[in-house]
Amino acid sequence: MYVRHVALTDFRSWSHLELELVPGRTVFVGPNGFGKTNIVEALWYSSTLGSHRVGSDAPLIRAGAERAIVSSIVVNDGRELAIDLEITAGRANKARLNRSPVRSAREILGALRAVLFAPEDLALVRGDPGERRRYLDELATTRRPSVAGVRADYEKVLRQRTALLKSAAGARYRGDAGALETLDVWDGHLASHGAKLIAARVALVTLLAPEIEKAYQLLAPASRPASVRYRSAVEAVEAEASTGAANQEVFEVALLDELARRRSAELERGVCLVGPHRDDLELRLGDQPAKGFASHGESWSMALSLRLAAYELLRSEGSDPVLLLDDVFAELDNARRRALVEVAASAEQVLVTAAVAEDIPQDWDARRMRIGMRDEDSGRVSEVIP
């Protein structure tokens, strides 16, 4: 799989940009602040409907514009697919596939399969559990686009149930049985959708675990062995997940039991204390959690292992995903650079950003695109002839 064409309109710093791309390695070189990362971010957004830099859509729209448009043409096994995505802050995105509108932007998921490496990846190890949940959910959605609907359904139920908890707290003291009966209904919805999401995550972790272990051994052979496991505050969920089984029925029953047990605490606090929104992917080195115990080098190796494992898993299940390397070589030592170069050597398409050409492996046969270096060139991209 590779991206043949990308066009941006009012996306980040770009008022308008059109690029023709080719298979193999392409490097975007330019100083920080000139928009090279925005190109990679746009493609990642087309792949996942999310940014690796911000949690909302508003920053993606150029100042003064009402919407941003990201268009791309993806080639997979000789067949072309045009993807058009319109991003509007505070409103649902609109999308088209092969120029035909789709009912939901989620229908473009899977059209462009990509894996991104970026400096922000350290947050996968050092950040809060939300970073690791997002990693799992984005990868699960890339593998199975239907997971996007599961996530959306769960998030909707979570919002509505949280609102009900806030209002039902007072109803309990007034003896309003109707409000609590409504909460019972929403408990069922949360358990049902939550069990589907947990099952998708657990199935993914089972496949990822050996790939992560293998990737970490490649990156840091002298370090402690790496391992991962799915963690849940619901004991029955964690016990089932630890077996590698993704039994949705078991998860649903466990969530319902825990919701009943934690009902009073939830009403008192007005928040949902049970569900996959509180779970985590635990990363371990030897017998210690990576978070808080891993050195800087070990943290980078673990973060890279997560991405390498994702790449190998997607690759084993179909065509090569597009490899996006956002200013990551500058962050790595020689050993980690070599490991990444080895993966990139066989990828169908690799798109790389770098502030200076020296950050790119010298022996790389790569097409180099320069982001405007002088004031009069700002916002322009030109090909550099080696």
Image (tube, rainbow, N blue to C red):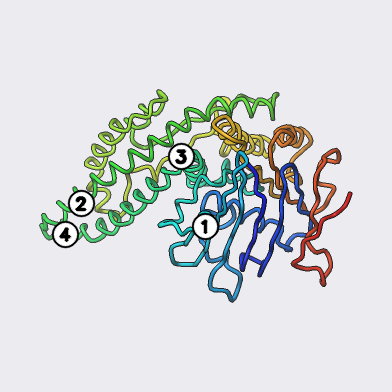
Q: Vertically, is 201 above or below 240?
A: below
Q: Nearer the viewer, residue 95 or 279?
A: 95
Q: How many marks?
A: 4
Amino acid, disc 2: Leu
Disc number for residue 171: 4
From the image, tell me which residue sits under label 2. 183
Q: Secondary structure at mark 3?
A: loop
User: Counting other residues with Cα less than 10 Å from the Cα at mark 1, is it few (<14), some (14-19), or many (20 or more)?
Assistant: few
From the image, tell me which residue sits under label 3. 144
Please state which of the two labelled residues, at mark 1 or mark 4, is closer to the viewer: 1
**Could you tell me residue 117's position as x and y percent?**
65, 44
Whole-number angstrom distance, CA of label 4 to CA of label 2: 11 Å
At 26% from the left edge and 46% from the top edge, which residue is drawn?
A: 189
Q: Classify residue 132 as left or right of residue 29.
A: left
Q: Earlier in the sequence, mark 4 or mark 2?
A: 4
Point out the residue furthest to the front here: 79
At 75% from the left edge and 60% from the top edge, which residue is drawn?
A: 32
Q: Secondary structure at mark 2?
A: helix
Q: Earlier in the sequence, mark 1 or mark 4?
A: 1
**Circle 3/circle 4 CB separation < 8 Å:** no
**Circle 4/circle 2 CB separation < 8 Å:** no
Amino acid, disc 4: Ala
Disc number for residue 55: 1
User: Counting other residues with Cα less than 10 Å from the Cα at mark 3, is it few (<14), some (14-19), or many (20 or more)?
Assistant: few
Q: Nearer the viewer, residue 304 or 166?
A: 304
**Could you tell me residue 30's position as x and y percent?**
79, 58
User: Counting other residues with Cα less than 10 Å from the Cα at mark 2, is it few (<14), some (14-19), or many (20 or more)?
Assistant: some
**Circle 2/circle 1 CB separation < 8 Å:** no
Amino acid, disc 1: Gly
Q: Secondary structure at mark 1?
A: loop
**Could you tell me residue 309's position as x and y percent?**
59, 32
Please state which of the two labelled residues, at mark 3 or mark 4, is closer to the viewer: 3
